[in-house]
Amino acid sequence: MAAQFGRRLRKGATTTAVAAVAVAALSASQAPGVTHAASGGSREASDATPPPGTPVTGNSPYYTDLPPLNTPDKPDTSIDLPATGTAEAGIPATVLAAYKQAERTIAGSDPGCHVPWQLLAAIGKVESGQARGGNVDANGTTLSPILGPVLNGVGFANISDTDNGAYDGDATHDRAVGPMQFIPSTWEKWGEDANSDGRRDPNNVYDAALAAGRYLCADGRDLAVKAHLDRAILGYNHSQEYLRTVLSWFEYYKRGTHGVPDGTGVLPVGRTPDSSVPAPTHIPTPPPSTPGSTGPTPTPTPSPSKPGGPGGKPSPTPAPTPPPSPSPVTRLEDAGTAELAAMAGHEFTARPTVRVKNAAGRAVPLQAVGFEIVGDTDALFAGGKKSVVLHTGADGTVMAPVLQAGEKTGTFTVRAKVVGPRVPVVDFTATVTVRAADAIARTGEKVLTAAPGTEFADAVEVKAAYKGAIASGVAVTATMITAADNPAVNDKGPYFKDADGKTVRTLTELKTDANGVLKLPKIYADDATGTFLLRLTTAGGATVTIELKVAAPAA
């Protein structure tokens, strides 16, 4: 399993046995009356088998930090607990609100599932460290991408690209994305728009939490049943160690949690192994809402009277809708793209580049932008794609992949479009010209001679180049001319034969081979004697003139 690579355990917890001990300790400290099945606790390895199909995360690595053995202080607990677990029990306000909203939504649409928000929190903890300590905006979207390693079969699962890079920016292989680490193909099936912004965004914790809850409830599962609970978690990652780790956090969060300001949550010990987007070394604290305050105070979110329990009823209080972004994307503009032109079969030297701006005229980073090739052309982006989605950088700009021209000449369009908000597109005109050569020369130096009425024994061979490189597939015209300064077609002297055996002194539709070489058909001499000229001209205007001598053989 991919999850076996590069894991870390906290404070000397170096074996899976420690995970089991932690779970047992947590279970032992439960309030009276909590049954083993209802709690979802696991004191020994589960014999549940994962559901068929690809796991939600593609078996990407996860954080293996364990909860403190001292559970958070909660009313009605049987012992007084020290404050050592308080920091770990704090969940960033927006992330916590997303989990609770998902629980309420599913309780209304699938009351038989009994999905508790603490289970979503447990999965969110091991998958993203509660979206990296609450590093999300007011709308619940991560401030920087959270991507798992490239699933290319090197130490991890091998999952080829399924989304043209739309979610993970990788058009070759898939990667797990966002707070709940969905691989793109799974997100396409289970993705939700929980915050009513018109988008199903795996990078948004509201959308991701609801999608995770829906998945856990799939196939009619009742998560109050131990076997169903284990099978649901194993569907997220096919690993018994993963199951034990999630259950340990589930038990911990059920003992009590509290909200903390976004950006101040506890980060896991290290980043997800091989992630290309490392965990930030500093989590910024949101600006205080009033002078002297340390951050925004989260508004408590009411929970169902019997969360997750049989017969529980959802709270009538509507779920809060996250406020919209204060500066929506309003403009997409050309960021100084040079002329897009290339010869057939060659790469374009310029690449379409655009900049995304908001209503205040400022650059928008991390905005998804799609590039699409439109028109009658066989040109493709690098990797053989007709379309690709990338994200803007810190300066709000994003550059399309390298364009590769095909053999079809003419013009086509490269269209840039913001993914999500309705913003006018930016179109770029690209031109593909015929293959050309700027140099052509004969490959040999032997004098070409023939007797009247015979054929030339040696073939004419030339080689073409463009900017010093082999010029393959270049069209060449061969013509018998009257003089170097008068390239009119000569009506006497050496000639070629067409397919019907008729005399012709001009050949077209000739092309150099893969090595830039062209070998001409046989050349024949008529009765005229003397020195004659053969001129070869390439697409692009390069020429070479070759002498052909016709003389009677010596006595």
Image (cartoon, helix red, strand yellow):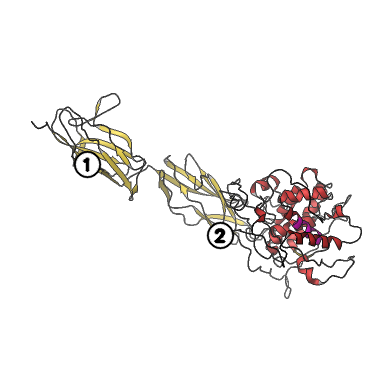
| Residue at the farthest bottom position | 292
Residue 10 is situated, as x and y percent measured from the top left of the image, at: 71, 65
Looking at the picture, tell me which residue is in the foreground, 290 or 501.
Answer: 501
Q: Residue 397 vs residue 215: left or right?
A: left
Residue 419, disc: none
Name the dominant secondary structure of the magenta segment: helix
Q: Secondary structure at mark 1?
A: strand
For the residue marked with disc 1, what is the amino acid? Thr
Task: Tell me: residue 472, above or below residue 236.
Answer: above
Q: Which residues are magenta?
A: 244-252
Q: Nearer the viewer, mark 1 or mark 2?
A: 1
Q: Is residue 36 left or right of residue 231?
A: right
Q: Position of residue 264 (x, y in %)?
A: 71, 68
Q: Relative to 258, say whether 439 is above or below.
A: above
Q: Secondary structure at mark 2?
A: loop
Between 50 and 356, the residue placed more toward the observer is 50
Q: Which residue is identified by label 2? A: 393
Circle 2: is it few (<14), some (14-19), or many (20+) Cα within 10 Å?
some
Residue lying at 63% horizontally and 68% vertically, measured from the top left: 281
Q: Nearer the viewer, residue 163 or 53?
A: 53
Judge the density around disc 1: few (<14), some (14-19), many (≥20) Cα neighbours within 10 Å: some
Q: Could you tell which of marks 1 and 2 lies nearer the N-terminus? A: 2
Q: Quadrant of residue 487?
A: top left
Image quarter where the C terminus lies is top left
Give percent across and percent down for residue 443.
26, 43
The quadrant where residue 250 appears = bottom right
Task: Give residue 101's position: percent from left, percent from top.
Answer: 78, 55
Callout 1–callout 2 Cβ contact below 8 Å: no
Type of amino acid at the residue the image marks with label 2: Gly
Question: Compared with residue 438, is residue 305 higher up or lower down, i.e. above or below?
Answer: below
Which residue is at a point 80% across and 71% down the rendered structure image? 83
Q: Please name the residue that numbered disc 1 is placed on.
A: 545
